[in-house]
Image (cartoon, rainbow, N blue to C red):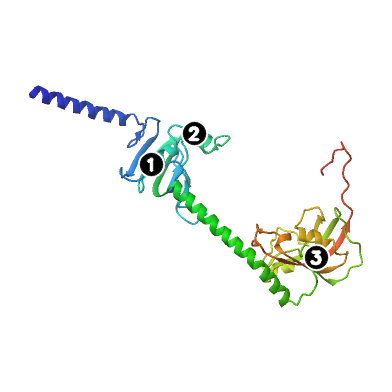
């Protein structure tokens, strides 16, 4: 019995020694290392907690710093989303000992620190063409992360489908409402002019005596654009911009110059401006189908009819095209 007991104690001693030898392989105090060279230290760990799988969305409170302890990222500071966390799908590991491997080790609610090759993170995971100046070649990054939420791949797909369906329903509602909104605007403003085949209304307030532009010619136009509710979204007039709250000091407020009839502007403008003569003033009332349509643009919502007060200031010939083989010179 004594011999058996002695052999058992020896086996335990050898096991303990091997365990500490494994830990001693790490040059970083308090960190263990995986077979792939990932250094890790758990602050909180629940081995029975659910772990993320490839394709799942993970929510992390996370930061990382370089080898001289400069914080390069912290989700709790200056986060554009206004939250203290970031969310992204867990991808396939990009290299041995990667941050993706680190996340796969964590369970829901776990918090840990990981030390990972900076070269591999920037050049392989981030696909940077070279290391940034604040990263020393061969150095390590220290990540600290808390896994706050896991959204499974199936749940994420279901949520995306739900959002797409809701967006599609909203778009259909907006499209259906456009006709009634447009008709009400025309009635409220006592507009009796006949629309063109495209649905454009041009209401002339001042007749010009200059030439009419042809497709491809250059025109200069003063304008103010409004939504049907009267909100000004753009103008070439500085005083109007200041009154409307759309003024930008970097912008030049002057007639807008463009080649008409060649698709450089919305179809309603191409059609409407070519109905005018130099010196003309008027109003273009444009349904969304020949404006910004289902996409909208900037401050213009989808399926928005637009109203433009316009003045055709000048028409000039189309720019001369270089002869075949002739090179243009940029000044």
Farthest top residue in view = 3
The residue under label 2 is 120
SS category of the residue bearing label 3: loop
**Number of the front mark, 2 or 3:** 3
Residue at point 11% right, 26% down? 5
Please report whichever mark, 2 or 3, sits nearer to the chain's N-terminal start: 2
Estimate how packed mark 2 is, as few (under 14), some (14 to 19) or many (20 or more) residues with alpha carbons within 10 Å: many
Q: Which residue is mark 3?
A: 196
Sequence-first disc among 1 and 3 = 1
Q: Nearer the viewer, residue 23 or 99?
A: 99
Of pointers 2 and 1, the one earlier in the residue sequence: 1
Q: Residue 232: which quarter of the image? A: bottom right
Mark 2 vs mark 1, CA separation in Å: 17 Å
Residue at image point 40% right, 34% down: 38
> Mark 1 packing: few (<14 Cα in 10 Å), some, or many (20+)?
many
Q: Which residue is mark 1?
A: 113
From the viewer's perspective, tell me whether residue 49 is left or right of residue 200: left
């Amino acid at each position: 019995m004594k011999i058996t007991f002695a052999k058992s104690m020896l086996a335990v001693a050898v096991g303990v020694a091997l365990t500490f030898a494994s830990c001693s392989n790490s040059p970083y105090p308090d960190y263990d290392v995986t077979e792939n060279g990932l250094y890790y230290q758990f602050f909180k760990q629940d081995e029975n907690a659910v772990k993320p799988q490839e394709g799942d969305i993970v929510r992390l409170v996370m930061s990382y710093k370089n080898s001289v302890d400069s914080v390069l990222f912290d989700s709790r500071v200056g986060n554009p989303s206004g939250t203290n966390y970031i969310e992204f799908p867990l991808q396939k590991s990009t290299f041995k000992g990667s941050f993706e491997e680190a996340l796969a080790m964590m369970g829901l609610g776990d918090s840990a620190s990981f030390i990972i090759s900076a070269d591999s993170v920037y050049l392989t995971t981030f696909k940077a063409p070279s290391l940034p100046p604040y990263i020393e070649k061969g150095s390590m990054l220290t990540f600290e992360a808390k896994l706050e939420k896991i959204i499974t791949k199936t749940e994420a797909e279901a949520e995306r489908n739900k959002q797409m369906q809701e967006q599609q329903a909203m778009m259909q509602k907006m499209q259906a409402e456009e006709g009634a909104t447009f008709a009400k605007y025309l009635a409220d403003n006592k507009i009796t002019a006949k629309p063109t085949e495209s649905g454009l209304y041009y209401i002339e307030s001042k007749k010009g005596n200059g030439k009419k532009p042809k497709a491809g010619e250059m025109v200069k136009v003063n304008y103010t654009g409004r939504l049907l509710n009267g909100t000004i979204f753009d103008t070439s007039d500085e005083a109007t911009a200041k009154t409307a709250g759309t003024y930008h000091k970097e912008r030049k407020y002057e007639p807008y110059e463009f080649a008409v009839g060649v698709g450089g502007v919305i179809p309603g403008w191409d059609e409407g401006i070519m109905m005018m003569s130099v010196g003309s003033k008027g109003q273009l009332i444009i349904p969304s189908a020949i404006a910004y349509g289902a996409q909208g643009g900037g401050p213009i919502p989808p399926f928005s009819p637009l109203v433009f007060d316009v003045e055709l200031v000048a028409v000039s010939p189309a720019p001369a095209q270089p002869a075949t083989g002739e090179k243009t010179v940029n000044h």
